[in-house]
Image: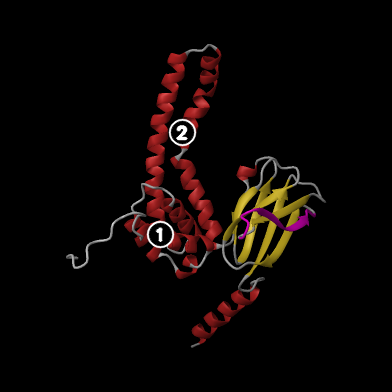
Amino acid sequence: MKKILFLLTASAAIISCSKVKDGEYLITGTAKGIENGKTIILQGMDPATRMSVALDTVKVENGKFEITGKVTEPAFHTLIIQGANQPFPFILETGEIKVEIDKDSIHKSKVSGTYNNDEYTTFNEDLTKTQKSLVDFQKKNTQKMQQAQQAQDTVTINSLMKQYMEIQTEVQATSKKKYLAYAESHPKSYISVLLLQGMINDPSTDIKKAESLYNGLDESLKNTIPGKEIKTKLGQAKMPAVGASAPPVGSAN
């Protein structure tokens, strides 16, 4: 009995320590290399116009910053850092989100603390490994390609392009398999609904497979903006083509 009471007390303590309520977010960030007073803008997308909008602006103080607010569903947002050469993407959702900004190397910045952001980080790491052969080829042959273009060496140019296309085709095929496997095994991940949205927009996608994946998604994801768009497109895909003749009355099913 004492053990049960202890576990209940511990659980209550953990819950009470949370700084945010359901539907709220708290972004706590460290800003490596960013001077005091520099601004960080939280940027999202207006669902009606699909245009980028600034949601909040804060200033860096002693290498740190905080942004709080309310959110109805997970969605990709960006942090625009004054002095950095590119924005930092992450998933804004309920919870305490931790961000480590590296101004000089934004791609080295990190996000963690919530389920979808942890999944996003892991997914990106795996995707980077998948695309490594393509990146390595580019690094190895960029100078060679530039020299061939300057010399108008079409043999070398065509050879390099052929090799690049072969690697690219292989990487794309591997990536598609991984996307499918991820969506099947992560029905609660926001990444899955975005992957499925991409599949729906691909004419070569098996609609029955896409529908099966959609049906397997967590209800919370089906109610997001991309989730609703997927449902609409699946419905449209089932509709008969314009101009298609209806079956004769009384014909066998």
Question: Could you say where residue 168 lies in the image, as x and y percent from the top left?
Answer: 42, 34
User: Could you say which disc has been placed on residue 52 in the image?
Assistant: none
Q: Amino acid at mark 1?
A: Gln
Neighbour class for label 2 at 10 Å: few (<14), some, many (≥20)?
A: many
Q: Nearer the viewer, residue 33 or 154?
A: 154
Q: Nearer the viewer, mark 2 or mark 1?
A: 1
- 30 relative to 239 in the view: left or right: right
Q: Residue at 63%, 47% (x, y): give it.
A: 109
Question: Could you say where residue 200 lies in the image, as x and y percent from the top left?
Answer: 42, 53
Q: Amino acid at mark 2?
A: Leu
- The residue furthest right is 37
First reached walking from the N terminus: tag 2 or tag 1: 2
Q: Which residue is mark 2?
A: 134
Magenta stretch in the rendered image: 48-61
Question: Could you say where residue 57 lies in the image, as x and y percent from the top left?
Answer: 76, 57
Compared to 129, does 240 lie above or below?
Answer: below
Instruction: Based on the picture, tell me whether residue 231 belongs to the magenta stretch.
Output: no
- 169 relative to 26 in the view: left or right: left
Measured in 3D between alpha carbons, the distance from the residue under mark 2 to the one under mark 1, in whole angstroms, is: 36 Å
SS state under label 2:
helix
Q: Residue at 69%, 60% (x, y): give it.
A: 28
Q: Residue at 67%, 49% (x, y): give it.
A: 101
SS state under label 1:
helix
Q: Residue at 41%, 30% (x, y): give it.
A: 165
Q: Nearer the viewer, residue 223 or 21?
A: 223
Q: Which residue is mark 1?
A: 236
